[in-house]
Amino acid sequence: MRSSPILLGHRLVLDGVKVMVLESCAMNIHSFYSFISKRYRKGRIARFKSVFRGGRVVDFGGSAAIWDQIGDGYDVTLLNKFPETNAGKYRMIIGDGCRAPFASKSYDMAFSNSVIEHVGDWEAQRRFADEMQRVGRRVFCQTPNRWFPMDPHSLTPFLHWVPQQLQTRWMFRFFGIRFWFSHNPGELEPAQMLSRHKMQELFPDCEIITEYAFGLPKSFIALTPQRAEKAESQTRARS
């Protein structure tokens, strides 16, 4: 039987409403994600600026976005393996953070924000951390806490606690609340989240600073202490 014009009209209206609802949900969840990210990033930026007031910085895996928020006063080089990354006004080198194409101690600060959990398995993370410590006189490396109950990438409780060998793009696509509405395929890659103990193992000479949310440890920052930088400066001065 052929559908009547009235039924077809109703169907079109319902389809339109569904699209509007999904688009609204997508906008709301991404707005929420953006709001939460910016809130905690603001405090992180303030911490970074308080410990490092200017100089040459290499951002492992970064883009222009965070440096536009940090502001002027830094000579920034972005190291990223994705050519489509928005570099803005900053210098960008296409390369792998696990094999950084820079001389040892060639930058005042090696910086990274929520990248190390995406580079691969434990050995890849170790190479990434080693390269940061080799290239930078100081290190500022932030990563989410594996044991925080909310997965910051999918906005889904406990999803990142699934054993690593079982985490797949399909799992994140079907169970990740954030990805029900819209997604960037690159964001679906499983993340190898780290604990405080693992961060200390990767950055043995750094202080591990804890960021909190709702009274719980949300993320960690590996930061080279000032005293280590002063000792290195004195060594260079004597040589």
Image (cartoon, rainbow, N blue to C red):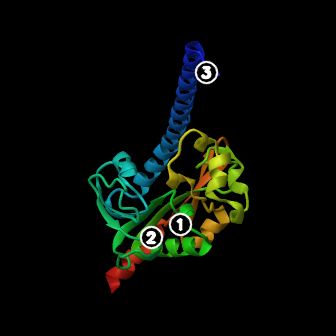
Residue 99 found in image quarter: bottom left
User: How many numbered marks are there?
Assistant: 3
- x and y, in percent, of residue 133 in the image: 47, 73
The numbered mark at residue 97 is 2
Q: Which residue is mark 3?
A: 2
Quick one: SS at disc 1? loop
Q: Nearer the viewer, mark 2 or mark 3?
A: 3
The numbered mark at residue 127 is none
Tell me which residue sits at (54%, 35%) in the image: 26
Q: Quadrant of the N terminus?
A: top right
Q: Residues within 10 Å of mark 2 (few under 14, many from 20)?
A: many
| CA separation in Å, label 1 and label 3 | 55 Å
Residue type beneath disc 2? Gly
Quick one: SS at disc 3? loop
| CA separation in Å, label 2 and label 3 | 61 Å
The relative height of residue 30 versus residue 120 in the rendered view (above or below) is above
Q: Which residue is mark 1?
A: 119
Please, which residue is most extreme toward the top here? Answer: 6
The relative height of residue 116 versus residue 67 in the rendered view (above or below) is below
